[in-house]
Image (tube, rainbow, N blue to C red):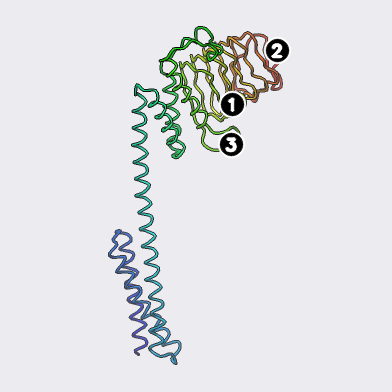
Amino acid sequence: MDKWVILIAGSVISVAAVSVVLIGWLRHRQGLLLTGAVLAALGLLFLVGGWLLIADPRSGLTEAIKTGGLAGGAVVALYALWLNDRKRRAEEDRNEHDRERVSDERFARSVEMLGNEADQVRVGALHALAGLAKTRADYTQTVLDILCSYLRRPFTHVSFEWRADDPHRHVEQDAEADRERQVRETAQRLIHDLLPARDTEGTTYDLDLTGAHIEYLELSNRRVGKLIARYTTFYGITRWNGAEFTGEVLLTSAVFKGRAELHHAKFRAGISLLDAKCERELNIRHALVERWADLRVTAPQIQHEGLSFGKLDRQQLPENWRIEDGELVTS
């Protein structure tokens, strides 16, 4: 009879333990979970010990207590492991929150420093923003937007009047403009570095350079989302050869003062060169245009050998240009 009493008592305590644990879990009460774990250990002590006495009458009370104690101890050990894991996750959450707070503060300080009069401070701020984007991918598009916004600020240089096709060849100096040029060239290099390489997978990032004055823009072999450069003036050689644009490329009324090298580029979502003007050679050899194309551009010379097209929903081409079987034909 005593054996059955021990077994029943263990069953009752185990059921009570489960009930307490469920209530503690639903109400997020740590104290109830601890009470439930203790009851579960005690219940298993009686339950396993009573079952052993019934199943094997030859085993003594000491053996039953030892076996039941091992079962109860296992429950306590599992609870301790769960508690430690919960503390670890809570600590990780706090650390992540602290990292986010530090990143937000770093971001705000860097943006503020972009308005500093000292060019060295502005360069440092740009590098700080780029570093933040490299460590926190969710900041990358925001940082690129800020870099593009900086490049859209009004800017001119004496070399633009004398050697717009290759401004660096003009030796006349303008101290203030030269310092600002260094900051802007830093922003352009950082944009290039933050963009992923072509033919890679992952997030794509957009660029908005509307109305900007850009020197030697380098996007070669980069993967870009949407590029907006309406009414933008490109000085020096513009190199986008081998770039892959997964979004639309909008160059309406843009002006290329130097050579525009777009050969082997891929325009996956279409390109607009409506009313764009190239004052030097436009090279679009072996480029690929998909979805739609507006190539009504003015240029003294256009290199277009091997230019191909995917399925186009619409097309606007210069006079005497036409597309046959995905290839450009001129007459």
**SS of the residue at dot 1?**
loop
Give the mark, 1 or 2, whose residue is nearer the N terminus: 1
Residue 9, percent across and down?
Answer: 33, 80
210 or 11: which is nearer to us? 210
Q: Kindly identify the amino acid type of the residue bearing the numbered disc 2.
A: Thr
Q: How many marks?
A: 3
Left or right of 27? Residue 185 is right
Q: CA distance from mark 1 to mark 2?
A: 27 Å
Q: Nearer the viewer, residue 39 or 120?
A: 120
Give how far apart the Cα atoms at labels 1 and 3 are.
Answer: 14 Å
Q: Amino acid at mark 3?
A: Thr
Instruction: Give the image location of residue 176, x and y in percent.
Output: 40, 15
At 40% across and 83% down in the image, what residue appears? 66
> In which image quadrant can residue 62 be found?
bottom left
| Quarter of the picture holding the C terminus | top right
Q: Which residue is mark 2?
A: 330
Comparing labels 1 and 3, the label whose residue is closer to the camera = 1
Q: Position of residue 288 (x, y in %)?
A: 64, 24
Q: Is residue 301 above or below residue 36?
A: above
- Rendered image: mark on residue 1: none
Query: Compared with residue 280, is residue 206 higher up or lower down, i.e. above or below?
Result: below
Residue 65: image quadrant is: bottom left
Question: Quick one: label 3 or label 2, which is nearer the N terminus?
Answer: 3
Label 3's element? Answer: loop
Mark 1 or 2, closer to the camera? 1
Callout 2 secondary element = strand
Residue that numbered label 3 is attached to: 200
